[in-house]
Image (cartoon, grey):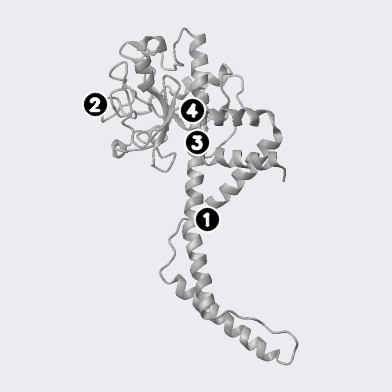
Amino acid sequence: MSSRQSDDDGLIIDLLLGRCDARQRGEIEERLAGEPDLRSLKQDVQNALSAMELLPEVEPSSDLVSRTLQRVASTRLTNALIAREQKGHRWSFSTFSMREAGTIAAAVLLLAALFVPSIRQARRRMLISECASNMGQIGSAVSAYAASNDEYLPIALESPAQWMQVSGRKPVSNSAALFKLLQSSHASPRVFQCPARGIESFAVVEGMTDFPSERHVGYSYQHPLTPEGPIRRSRYSPAEQEKMVILSDSSPVFPGGCFDRSKVSALASDNHGGTGQNVLRLNNSVAWASNPNVGVDGNNIFLAEGVFDYRGDEMPTSRTDSFLLPAYTSN
């Protein structure tokens, strides 16, 4: 293996395990865009890590060691009988002592206990890192869109409207605002799908105004209307832009586009197993948050400030109230 290939292996592993800073990640992604061999290497490493996800997360039974030793003892007895039958031949069958077998069994259990959880944790960090990269690209797309639209963010709700289906009333899906980033060629379909939820590709064809289904958009986007009107980035100070969240992993409060009252107190999106969520702020910065109270004034980004019951037409209560709507409600 050449020195260059060895270095590339290390770079890809660091990228997938989330050990790269923003600058390093940008440099590697730039190389991935222009080097097919490096993309192939990344896919191979991803496949190797993904294979660990196929293993069920179960605790070993309390009698596993004793059953393993019994199986070893049974095999040893069988080998001894075979050796007796083969007596007089030149070859013989070596066997382990019970102490050796017990040591091997204990070592296997120890390695499984240490190695498998570590691989799973590395896999989770990799998915969080890829998700954050997606959000960074969405942030760049939002900025490009705003620069071409007098600093206004993408908007689908032109006036106060029903954004959640209630009593048969057809809603206006807020994800249609994000879809405008595809229509304007500022982003690609894959960046709107959280890798922790799985990826389903689709093509943007003429006449489409929204994502094909909720499987194709894994992020919740800010309600674009405030008491002062549509969100215009130039109206926010740098300090406000640094804190105001406009996108995150999908809201746990509105699973499938419907309000779930039992989830009002949920601490995290379901995208990453309830451990937290990536958030994109108005200044394009991306961060990991273990709870939803990361708005401008520490408000819950999944709820309109002070609102705990929803009809589907609620709005942010102030110009800096982060209120992220269901990812998709067109159905």
What residue is drawn where x is 72% and y is 43%? 2
For numbered disc 2, what is the local secondary structure?
A: loop
Label 2 to label 3: alpha-carbon separation: 32 Å
For numbered disc 3, what is the local secondary structure?
A: helix
In x, y percent, where is residue 173?
44, 24
Mark 4 highlights which residue? 135
Mark 1 highlights which residue? 55
Q: Are marks 2 and 3 in contact (CB under 8 Å)?
A: no
Q: Nearer the viewer, residue 15 or 234?
A: 15
Mark 2 highlights which residue? 306
Where 91 sits versus 267, above or below?
Answer: below
Mark 3 highlights which residue? 129
In x, y percent, where is residue 298?
29, 27
Bin the neighbour count of mark 1 within 10 Å (Cα to Cα): few under 14, some 14-19, many 20 and up: few
For numbered disc 1, what is the local secondary structure?
A: loop
Where 4 sits versus 55, above or below?
Answer: above
Closer to the eye: label 1 or 3: 3
Give amino acid for label 4.
Met
Whether residue 323 can be seen here: yes
